[in-house]
Image: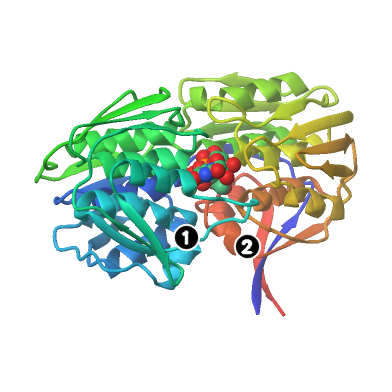
Amino acid sequence: MEEVIKIEGGHRLHGTVRISGSKNSTVALIPACVLGNAPITIYGVPNISDVKSLMELLRELNVYVEQIDEETLYIDPTKMNNIPMVSNAVSKLRASYYFMGALLGKFGHAEIKMPGGCYLGPRPIDLHLKGFEALGASITYENGCYILHADELIGNRIFLDISSVGATINIMMAAVYAKGRTVIENAAREPEIIDIATLLNKMGAKIHGMGTSTLVIDGVGELKTSGCNHEIIPDRIEAATYIIMAAAIADDMIIENVIPQHLEAILMKLEEIGINMKVGPDFVEIFGRNQELKPTEILTKPYPGFATDVQQPFTALLTQAAGQSVVTETIYTERFKHCYELNKMGADIDVRTPSGFVNGKTKLSGTSVVATDLRCGAALVVAGLMAEGITEIHDVYHIDRGYDNLDNKLRSLGAVFWREKVE
Ligand code: EPU
């Protein structure tokens, strides 16, 4: 029996939705907590399956982890053991690779199998490994497992060929205890990186230049031995997803607990295609549209450009624009599987990698579709809300990896959304 999501489309949304803590921050903050030797309390933790997988991994390392309430995690690494990380939980998410940087940094040794996560085309980790090597680590790959070792890590100047989010965070974590200064050039500037560096600095690390493309880490002999607290930033991708849902089918909807500055590229695109909105200090209110949506061109870019993660749900919205929109991927050139699923619902998207040509406006009808990855799932939910009839989404575990409390949030906005077990 498989659990599927069902959506009866056509019901207009209204009301307020509160955005949860950032998934992509959380999945790096949790491994970052083990770098120190003191308990840490993290607030605003989203209730998603990636967090459950990371809690499993922490327990395997004998790190004490307790869910204090729905959104609060208490993590105490004082009794942790550095054992090889080869369990199934490692393969459930991409972010398990952050234990490479954390364990290498703390113990000079890490053994971990290849991480999992959404398939978006090839997702190499060569830049992470080059960074660790530049700090003095040796790396071998045996029986599907990376073995990283360094008697001593020494700060170095590292240039990232691509401003990779994962490589920036991983190298930053490994460099916290490295002797001397590490400089990461062409570092990624995503808000999540600032969030991780902020926690590490609270723990006693010395990191400067967060949010710029030059990240400087001055190695410290030890981190603080007394605990600290951290509140996770709001999830800009979850926020963008609800904003797109509102643009698709709401008359008036407020998306609260957002940092609008993190969403600038997306909000400007929405204005360009004809969505009316009001942007407050920590909320966005969407009033819908009083005209036909205009087609547009999207080019995904690292932050502060248009986020690749948002490209997928945005494409679902563009099926309702009158004319041809062009969506071009520069981060993951194969991130177009959602287009084939949207076409099953009546969209007309011609994928010629690295672009999708969305010919609108097309009527969408509910049918059986597959969430091939997390944000494909988000795109199908957007489409399902707009479609005539019932949309049945399979492989919903991808969606549950990244959207906190989706069912209740959508129902409270007036969506007709439920789950069913099917053969
Ligand atoms: N890349 C390399 N070599 C590397 C690392 C990356 O060639 O060693 C390439 C990738 O193949 C890609 C580009 O560099 O073409 C950027 O990848 P990046 O490393 O920045 O991505 P990531 O860290 O693996 C994070 C998010 C993704 C998000 C990307 C891009 C997490 C856990 N994941 O992935 O989020 O799409 O940054 O912004 O933070 C999602 O939330 O659905 C998701 C997939």
Task: Name the residue: 66% across, 35% down.
Answer: 330
Rate crowding at label 2 as few (under 14), some (14 to 19) or many (20 or more) other CA atoms within 10 Å.
some
Q: Is residue 126 left or right of residue 56?
A: right
Determine whether, in the image, residue 392 is placed left or right of residue 82: right
Q: Residue at x 65, y 32 (%)?
A: 300
Q: Is residue 317 left or right of residue 193?
A: right
Point out residue 410 in the picture as x, y percentages from the top left corner: 61, 49
* Rendered image: mark on residue 82: none
Front residue of 171 and 17: 171
Q: Is mark 1 within 8 Å of ligand 1?
A: no
The amino acid type of the residue labelled 2 equals Val
**Does mark 2 have its CB less than 8 Å from ligand 1?**
no
Q: Which residue is at a point 51% across and 53% down the rendered structure image?
A: 405
Vertical arrangement, residue 263 with respect to residue 100, above or below: above
Q: Tell me: residue 137, above or below residue 286.
A: below
* Quarter of the figure with the C terminus: bottom right
> Mark 2 = which residue?
396
Q: Camera-side residue: 196 or 245?
A: 196
User: Which color scheme does this rendered protein use?
Assistant: rainbow
Q: Assess whether mark 2 and mark 1 are in contact (beta carbons under 8 angstroms).
A: no
The residue to which callout 1 is attached is 115
Q: CA distance from mark 1 to mark 2?
A: 20 Å
Q: Characterize the local packing of mark 1: few (<14), some (14-19) or many (20 or more) Cα atoms within 10 angstroms.
A: some
